[in-house]
Amino acid sequence: MKNHVANANMLLPVVRRPRASWTIPPVDAAERLEKERREEERRKALIEGTTSDGRILWCMMNDRARKMIESGVHSAEEVVAMIEGEINEFPMLRSEWAIMFARPRGLGVEHLLHTSARSFAIFIHFAHQLELLARQQAGDHAPSPKP
């Protein structure tokens, strides 16, 4: 009982907010929440059937490939060889990586599962090249990759 009384008499600091920082929620708050909910559902659908480890390794491989392409120092063969090596190093993640490559692009996963690691690596490299070209044409001038 004594602890209860001691807690009741304890003063808590109150941080006041000036009236100028008071805000009224925007009128379209419900629309924004609905849009965020739909976007979250879309993201969950894209990664369904994948593991967090598979997604992390996929992102690391793609970032490495993208940097190699954007640097312009590495040839297409070197980039494809790096991607192919990653695919061969983690064969158990092949189906997950096929999902992660195909779904955002609206492609079927089945054909990627039955291609060679080299063909899959070439698809990935080609997709990165197209993204770089699109960015360059949009005005984001990254260095041109080596052919």
Image (cartoon, rainbow, N blue to C red):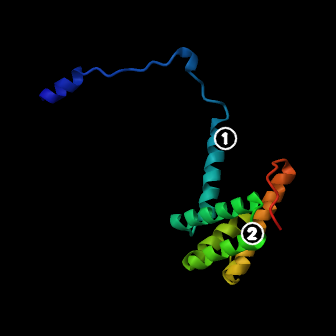
- Answer few, some or many: residues within 10 Å of disc 2's Cα (few below 14, many 20 plus, some between 14 and 19): many
The image quadrant of residue 86 is bottom right
Q: CA distance from mark 2 to mark 1?
A: 38 Å
**Tag 1 secondary structure:** helix
Q: Which residue is mark 2?
A: 125
Q: Which residue is mark 1?
A: 31
Q: Residue pushed farthest right?
A: 137
The type of residue carrying mark 2 is His
The type of residue carrying mark 1 is Glu
Which residue is nearer to you in this view: 130 or 86? 86
Which residue is nearer to you in this view: 59 or 44? 59
Task: Tell me which residue sits at (65%, 52%) in the image.
Answer: 39
| Residue 78 location (% of width, % of height) | 72, 72
The image quadrant of residue 34 is top right
Q: Quadrant of the N terminus?
A: top left
Task: Tell me which residue sits at (61%, 56%) in the image.
Answer: 41
- Answer few, some or many: residues within 10 Å of disc 1's Cα (few below 14, many 20 plus, some between 14 and 19): few
